[in-house]
Amino acid sequence: MNRRQKALVSSFAAITIGVAVVGCDSDTTSSEDTTSATSAVSTETGSATTGNGDDSGGETFGGLPVYEPSDEVSKAPGSLVLTSPDSVEKIGEFYKNAVRDGDWDIVSETVSRFAASITVKKRGRGASINVAPGTDGSVISISSYPSL
């Protein structure tokens, strides 16, 4: 990955994390609520595991499937950035279906050939999925966080 691609991916990840933090709505959250929400997602946030609760047997991150084919660019607690040779629209449709099949409550959803952004909530956790065009395909950013 060249320097320009790394800069693009880093910028995209920073924007996504900023959106995720704003989505937490910390003004109305007590420390007790935050602790219980954090406990509820501690086993899923920031970890990729084999098996996503369905028959596909794929990896998950924050309770969401990890798109394949993809390559991991970076991973930190609550944040995963991937690249894929597939189109933004194809990946967006994949995640649109995955959140519906996974019983997530959709907070907002926009999927087009130019960009995809899906924000979801489910039992004490939230997630934001963003897909943007990359040099050789698409960049996927998933942020997972406690939510009330």
Image (cartoon, rainbow, N blue to C red):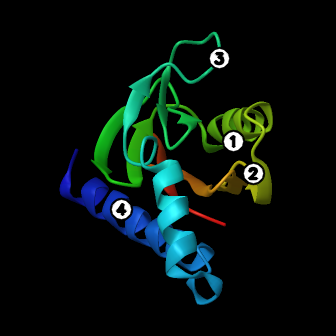
Camera-side mark, 1 or 3: 3
Disc 1 crowd, CA 10 A, few/some/many (<14, 14-19, 20+): some
**Contact, mark 2 vs mark 3 (Cβ under 8 Å):** no
C-alpha distance separating marks 2 and 1:
5 Å
C-alpha distance separating marks 1 and 3:
23 Å
Q: Which residue is mark 3?
A: 54
Q: Look at the numbered disc 2 and give the secondary structure of its residue.
A: loop
Residue pictured at 47% horizontal, 54% vertical: 39
Q: Amino acid at mark 4?
A: Leu
Q: Earlier in the sequence, mark 2 or mark 3?
A: 3
Q: Earlier in the sequence, mark 1 or mark 3?
A: 3
In the rendered image, residue 19, in percent from the top left (x then y), is placed at 55, 73
Q: Which residue is mark 1?
A: 89
Camera-side mark, 4 or 3: 3
Occupied quadrant, residue 29: bottom right
Disc 2 crowd, CA 10 A, few/some/many (<14, 14-19, 20+): few
Q: In the rendered image, which quarter contains the N terminus? A: top left
Foreground residue among 93 and 18: 18
C-alpha distance separating marks 2 and 4:
20 Å
Q: Earlier in the sequence, mark 4 or mark 3?
A: 4
Q: Which residue is mark 4?
A: 8
Residue pictured at 63% horizontal, 56% vertical: 124
Q: Is residue 147 above or below residue 106?
A: below
In the rendered image, residue 103, in percent from the top left (x then y), is placed at 78, 38
Whether residue 123 can be seen here: yes
Whether residue 142 can be seen here: no
Q: Amino acid at mark 1?
A: Glu
Residue that sits furthest to the front in the current view: 32
Q: Look at the numbered disc 1 and give the secondary structure of its residue.
A: helix
